[in-house]
Image: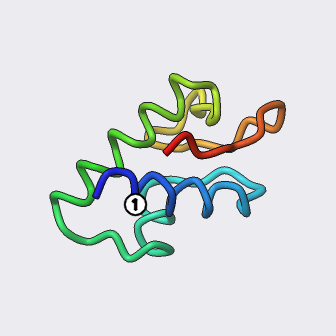
């Protein structure tokens, strides 16, 4: 389940050119259950740690793709 969520988020982020927040991501990928939202949060956290995403300095839960890195799934 985590791998499939990671792949879905990576694919969506790869096509995104602007800042996004959890709400936009949730609507785009139909993430509605509390369990899926927790999983989404963990995936985003790891992508930030891996420098695939940049967290907005002031806006809460807002991110954008790091254009210096290419997203390649490890799973």
Image quadrant of residue 41?
Answer: top left
Could you tell me residue 3's position as x and y percent? 39, 52
2 over 58 or under it: above or below: below
Residue 23 horizontal/vertical position (percent): 42, 63
Viewport quadrant of the N terminus? bottom left
Mark 1 Cα shell of 10 Å, populated few (<14), some (14-19), many (≥20) = few
Q: Is residue 42 left or right of residue 68?
A: left
Which residue corresponds to the image point at 50% horizontal and 63% vertical from the top-left? 8
Q: Which residue is painted at 63% across and 25% down in the image? A: 51
Image position of 68 with respect to 24: above or below: above
Q: Hey, which quadrant is residue 33 in on the image?
A: bottom left
Residue that carries the numbered disc 1 in the rendered image:
4
Position of residue 5 measured from the top left corner of the image (x, y, whole percent): 39, 58
* Color encoding of the figure: rainbow
Q: Residue furthest left?
A: 34
User: Residue at the front extreme?
Assistant: 75
| Tally of numbered tags | 1
Residue at screen point 73% across, 63% down: 15
Left of 4 or right of it: where is 51?
Answer: right
Note whether 23 is above or below 60 in the view shown.
Answer: below
User: What secondary structure is found at the residue carrying circle 1?
Assistant: helix
Q: Residue at x 59, y 26 (%)?
A: 57
Residue 74 position, x and y percent, is 55, 40
Answer with left or right where residue 74 lies relative to residue 39: right
Frontmost residue, 12 versus 23: 12
């Amino acid at each position: 389940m985590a791998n499939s969520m990671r792949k879905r988020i990576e694919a969506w982020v790869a096509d995104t050119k602007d800042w996004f927040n959890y709400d936009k991501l949730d609507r785009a990928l139909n993430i509605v259950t509390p369990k899926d939202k927790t999983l989404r949060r963990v995936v985003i956290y790891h992508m930030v740690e891996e420098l695939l995403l940049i967290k907005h300095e002031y806006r809460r839960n807002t991110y954008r793709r790091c254009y210096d890195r290419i997203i390649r799934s490890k799973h």
